[in-house]
Image (cartoon, rainbow, N blue to C red):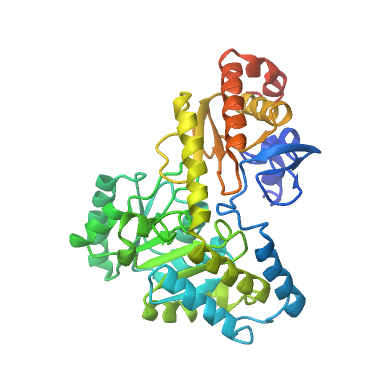
Amino acid sequence: MKDLFERIIENKGPLGKWASQAEGYFVFPKLEGPISNRMKFQGKEVITWSINDYLGLANLPEVKKVDGEAAHEHGSAYPMGARMMSGHTDFHEQLERELATFVSKEASYLLNFGYQGFMSVVDALVTKDDIIVYDVDAHACIIDGVRLHMGKRFTFMHNDVESLEKNLERATKMAEQTGGGILVISEGVFGMRGEQGILKEIVALKKKFNFRLLVDDAHGFGTLGKTGAGAGEEQGVQDDIDVYLATFAKSMASIGAFVAADQEIIDYLKYNLRSQMFAKSLPMVYVKGALKRLDMMRTMPQLKAKLWENVDALQNGLKERGFDIGTTSSCVTPVYLNGSIPEAMALVKDLRENYGIFCSIVVYPVIPKGLILLRLIPTATHTMEDISETLDAFSSIRERLENGTYKRLSAAVAAAMGE
């Protein structure tokens, strides 16, 4: 019999094995200073492309004023207890009403965190007799939510309507045997590739199959659609999304999330969401802060307009210079390059140290071996100067990647790791 920790000590995992080389720099880096387009990294100013503050709300004086006043009045504890017991307030209800109206749903319910909340929503919506069909490239919170499901589940190929239809046929036959229903899950925007989910095509299949649709719109909420109500509004199918979920951690630059649906569904979830029933209520600091942020999203369309001005300038500039940014149809801007993990480390270090560019690096196992994904998140706070400097830097690092500079620089790391 093995000691439980033996495996953990011997096998750190595909990312953990790089900890000694990566921690503190490539992973768990420490950005300092006010949240903005330019921050400090290890004492140097860098252009930050890794902050999900899409609308630039995080450091606005009027937002910080509301946050500060709420903290001064209530502290970080109020209200104490779970919503069902002692943590319910008029402000929680007000925020839920306003969020529901904003995303064109009858009702909504607050969640403490998007990740935790999504898992719990999936768990509450299905029983062992139901079948889940979800996109194979779904976010980890969806995958973990599906893992809680005691019944059958099928994945369909990413954004592939034919694959979805085949799996719906399988699910329908199975549901007829179990007496259950079918839940289809997609993202509004896939956070790595930046592609919108094929919500319009999924909704069209409702004419042929009997299923309900759950959408995680973390990156679409606030950035897509005429009013910023998300990917469903952008694609003209918001009314056909049965359960809509978004987080405050992106466009609203805060903590928390919400789920929105018909009143009857929200009433059910309020009494069956384990992550909320057995967790402390969302503190008033975040509730009042979210009310202010939502009001600004509604009344200041110039924030989203500036965001998209920057998105278009960055993405068009990258494409004009021959970079592969995939098929993104959102603010998320991936840049695909070919190279090993050690080369990726050398490349990113060069970007940060010599060009003052800070962006996220994504490698295997999140994406296939041999690929490097540099993920940029434009915000409303970025400037055309930021974009111009970044485009010039990317041209330089691509040249160094292609001529073998990073391979030579990373040879020692690669040898140490057996790559």
Expressed as whole percent of the image width and height from the top left, the position of residue 306 reads 52, 49
- Residue 272 appears in the figure: no
Assign the C terminus to one quadrant of the image: top right
Expressed as whole percent of the image width and height from the top left, the position of residue 332 reads 50, 44
Q: Is residue 190 left or right of residue 385?
A: left
Residue at 48% in and 61% down:
145
Expressed as whole percent of the image width and height from the top left, the position of residue 132 reads 36, 60
Nearer to me, 293 or 149: 293
The quadrant where residue 122 appears: bottom left
Residue at 76% in and 49% down:
33
- Residue 89 appears in the figure: yes
Give the vertical position of 44 relative to 396 (above or below). below
Residue at 26% in and 71% down:
179
Nearer to me, 299 or 328: 299
Nearer to me, 124 or 245: 245
Give the vertical position of 390 relative to 408 (above or below). below
Residue at 60% in and 43% down:
382
Of all residues, the one furthest to the right in this rendering is 43
The quadrant where residue 260 appears: bottom left
